[in-house]
Amino acid sequence: MTYFAKWKNIFKLSFVALFLPGWASGIYAQEFKAQVTVDASQIPTSNLSVFKTLEKDWQSLINKTRWTDRVFEANERIECTFLLSVRKYENNRIEGELSISAFRPVYNSTYKTPLLLLSDKKIRFNYQEYQPLTFTDYQYENNLVSITAFYLYMILGYDFDSFKNGAGKPYFERAQKVAEMAAGAGAVGWDLEAAGKYSRRRWVQQALDENNVMFHTAFYNYHRRGLDFMADDTRKGKTGVAHALEQLGKLDRTRADLLLKLLFDAKSDEIVRIFSGGPRVPAQQHLPDLLTDLAPYYQAKWKRIK
């Protein structure tokens, strides 16, 4: 089965997993294929083993935990990277910046489109070498585990949304639950920041806001009715992407500012590449103005669209 066949066969696969759980677990892998890096080059310490241990155990937490009840074949695992740049380390307390990327394959091509490219500067957690890193549903363990679970559920939400309109909602709801538990436990970095500032909780709130349903529809159309047609019919693919961007223009910017910011952080270069060459489509004529309105911080890029 290909990555794209899982929606066509999801009910059949769920039936198999339900009645043959042992067989399914032997064939299907976990959801993520993550590469984790802990960069402690700025820390003046000879005890670097703690960071290597953290790196190994953190990657194991992501790749070996079952995050959903879905069945994923090995080649369907979501590719992502977690890079922690450590800024401070004292008394088992680690502070730094976390950069995350996640990708999705595009049908009939070797190209992988970025679902998310983001940086979180509010990473603080306590960690003692060889401390177990385990995730438990509906229970706060520690801040690193909560941060990890939150981002993985958001990635799952985006990935599922890109294949079926609205299919990511259950994972956004799980991410929100993780955020609420962490905030309730007083963990650092879970503040509900004001508009214009990045906030994990505000991001997931916007993802679940009923007023932002059009965002998920546009996200689905961008991928399934846009990018996935590009290899076989470039004109059709470009038209699909352009129409998806037009749908984003219908959003209330004040309620979806963070959704839009993160989307264009991931997609701006891709959008420029799509519309800077090849056959022109009627819908792209007004794209520079639309995109400037949606993401003025990338205005210089939008000027490259002809």
Image: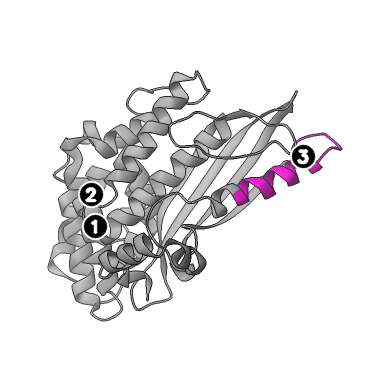
Q: Which residue is mark 3?
A: 50
Query: What secondary structure is the stretch in magenta mostly built from?
Result: helix
Residue at the image point whose x is 84% and y is 37% from the top: 47
Residue 50 in magenta stretch: yes
Q: Which residue is mark 2?
A: 216
Residue at the image point whose x is 32% and y is 26% from the top: 195
Q: Which residues are magenta?
A: 42-60
Q: Which residue is mark 1?
A: 220
- Three-letter amino acid code at disc 3? Val
Q: Secondary structure at mark 3?
A: helix
Q: Residue 204 at x, y = what percent?
A: 33, 36
- Three-letter amino acid code at disc 2? His
Q: Residue 217 at x, y = what percent?
A: 19, 52
Q: Secondary structure at mark 2?
A: helix
Q: Secondary structure at mark 1?
A: helix
**In this rendering, is residue 237 above or below 158?**
below
Question: Relative to 248, is 162 on the left or the right?
Answer: right
Q: Which of the 4 image quadrants contains residue 269?
A: bottom left
**In this rendering, is residue 219 above or below 177?**
below
Q: Tell me how far mark 3 sits from mark 2, CA to CA.
A: 41 Å
